[in-house]
Image (cartoon, rainbow, N blue to C red):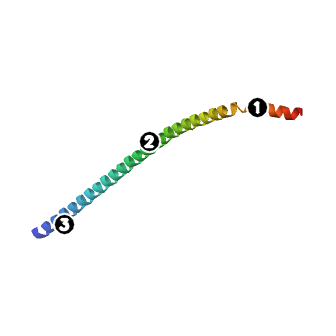
């Protein structure tokens, strides 16, 4: 009788140990999922920050390039005006002579 009690008690203890192990495994799995989710969210935030920084840098660079091109275009227009300024009166005179003639 005593042996049967001990066997049943041992079976109950082993079942309890198995249940505790299952519960601990489930807790560890949940911790792992939570950790992976947190790492994934942090990586996504870092990616978004990197994208925002790249966009801001590209905008800044683009605006600087636009200003540079505007200045260059204005300089070229001024040079063209200076180049053609001396030729305009004689050309206008030739056209007027042609039209009169």
- Which numbered marker is on residue 72? none
Report the front residue among 81 and 59: 81
- Which numbered marker is on residue 90? 1
- Which numbered marker is on residue 53? 2
Q: Residue at the location (34% across, 54% down)?
A: 33
Disc 1 crowd, CA 10 A, few/some/many (<14, 14-19, 20+): few
Could you say whether the residue bearing mark 1 is in a helix, strand or loop? helix
Q: In the image, which is nearer the foreground, mark 3 or mark 1? A: 1
Disc 3 crowd, CA 10 A, few/some/many (<14, 14-19, 20+): few
Q: Residue at the location (15% across, 65% down)?
A: 10
Could you say whether the residue bearing mark 3 is in a helix, strand or loop? helix
Please state the horizontal and vertical placement of residue 84, each as a whole percent of the image: 69, 34
Report the front residue among 46 and 77: 77
Could you say whether the residue bearing mark 2 is in a helix, strand or loop? helix
Image: 13 above or below 57? below
Q: Name the residue under label 3.
A: 11
**Earlier along the polypeptide chain: callout 3 or callout 2?**
3
Cα–Cα gap, marks 1 and 2: 57 Å
Left or right, residue 8 beside residue 101: left
Q: In the image, which is nearer the foreground, mark 1 or mark 2? A: 1
**Earlier along the polypeptide chain: callout 3 or callout 1?**
3
Report the front residue among 27 and 10: 27
Q: In the image, which is nearer the foreground, mark 3 or mark 2? A: 2
**Earlier along the polypeptide chain: callout 1 or callout 2?**
2
């Amino acid at each position: 009788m005593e042996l049967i009690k001990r066997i049943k008690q041992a079976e109950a203890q082993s079942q309890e140990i198995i249940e505790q192990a299952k519960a601990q495994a489930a807790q560890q799995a949940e911790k792992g999922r939570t950790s992976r989710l947190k790492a994934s969210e942090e990586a996504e935030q870092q990616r978004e920050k990197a994208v925002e920084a790249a966009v801001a840098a590209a905008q800044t660079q683009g605006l600087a390039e636009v200003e540079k091109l505007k200045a260059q275009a204005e300089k070229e227009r001024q040079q063209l005006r200076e180049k053609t300024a001396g030729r305009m009166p004689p050309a206008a005179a030739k056209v007027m002579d042609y039209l009169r003639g």
